[in-house]
Amino acid sequence: MKPTSFTPSPTAMRNLDALLVVSGAVLAVGLFVAPNRTGDSLSIGAFAMLSVFLGGLVFVAFEYITGARWSVPFRRVYEALASNLWIGGAAMVAVVVLRRDVYAWTPADGAAAGTFWFKALWLNPTWLVVRAAAYVTVMSLLAAAIIWTSRTQDRTADFSLTRRNRRLSAVTLLVFAPTFSLAACEWFMSLEPMWFSTVWGAYHFAGLATSTLAVVVLIALHLRRTGHWRSTFTDDHLHDLGKLLLGFSCFWMYLWFCQYMLIWYSNIPEETGYFVHRTQGAWGPMFIANVALNWVVPFLVLLPRPSKRSAATMARVAGVVLVGRWLDLYLMVYPSSSSAPTWGAWETAAVVFFAAASLWLIFSALAKASLTPVGDPALYSNRGNTHVTHDEHTEGNRVWT
């Protein structure tokens, strides 16, 4: 199979550069003029970007662990996301450093910690930053190892490297589960430290999965539309991504309902206060819109088979899911410090900055390697869902077992 390369449009990259400069300047001003709102927006944007990049690594690991062949032809999109994990992580760590007093928790009025001694210790500002850096460093190193092995396999056609990545993927998933759950609790649940949820980590994983799949759908469709993947990314691939997006959207709704229903049923004041605030006044319509964007729309639109094979429909649903992910994070962060929803230059600048930064980083990463992992044995096996014939590669007669 011949390797294909990607060169981002110079005009598109210049436009992204301009957006980054303008929105970055607005955010810099916002840190002095409206530090709380700007800080909240930075927290949402940095975590959203980090989640997508981390999601790329998770889906690469899933692919290796399950032995899936159908997604191998477009795995480089997942890898492009994962290769920028360290940048997204650095952005999130910077936000934690900037807002360490907001994330930290101490007993009120300097009173003794009492039964909350562990919470006071765990959310110590210095310890909070150290853990954030450790989470990002470990996951970035695992991402770098998997991607380096995949690129080496392209050059050497050494099929045994797949086994190495399977082992690395197992370690990645084992490390990801606790670190991501802890990070989600420390960076978002601690904004209201007297409130808690036992499904918080899994709930954030569901949001990570849906937003990552939405980005993969949009990037893959862009590459096919521009002629890079006319025969590589087929309607069958789009259909499978649509099924995954539908499934994880339902998973998100399941966890959302479990969290809300159990808190509503138990009716404990310490727990219900979180949702009471978010269903009152102007927050109410946004609370309903969150469910509509993250589940109702994907569920109703993607149920029919033709919808999952339509590029236009899938692109629109992916856009809706990304807006829903932002709204979900907004409802976690802003009500903890605001009595009513706010929107202005600082929030707009944050959305533009992190969207432009993500696209710039993804396009740059895609340009650094072949768009297809030509050394992967799954492309040349005559078993499973493959879209490549044996005579397209000099090593095509070798079958991975």
Image (cartoon, rainbow, N blue to C red):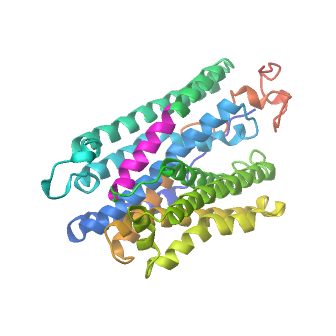
Residue 96 visible within the image: yes
Where is residue 264? Give x, y as percent: 52, 66
The question of residue 179 being in magenta is answered with yes
Where is residue 127? Give x, y as percent: 26, 39
Instruction: Tell which residue pokes out farthest to the bottom in this image.
Output: 281
Residue 361 visible within the image: no
What secondary structure characterizes most of the magenta part?
A: helix
Quarter of the image with the N terminus is top right
Residue 374: quarter of image: top right
- In front: 362, or 126? 126
Where is residue 173? Give x, y as percent: 55, 34
The question of residue 13 being in magenta is answered with no
Residue range corresponding to the magenta coloring: 175-191
- In front: 363, or 211? 211
Quarter of the image with the C terminus is top right
Give left or right: position of 129 versus 86: left
Question: Looking at the image, which residue is at 44% across and 38% down?
Answer: 179
Residue 357: quarter of image: bottom left
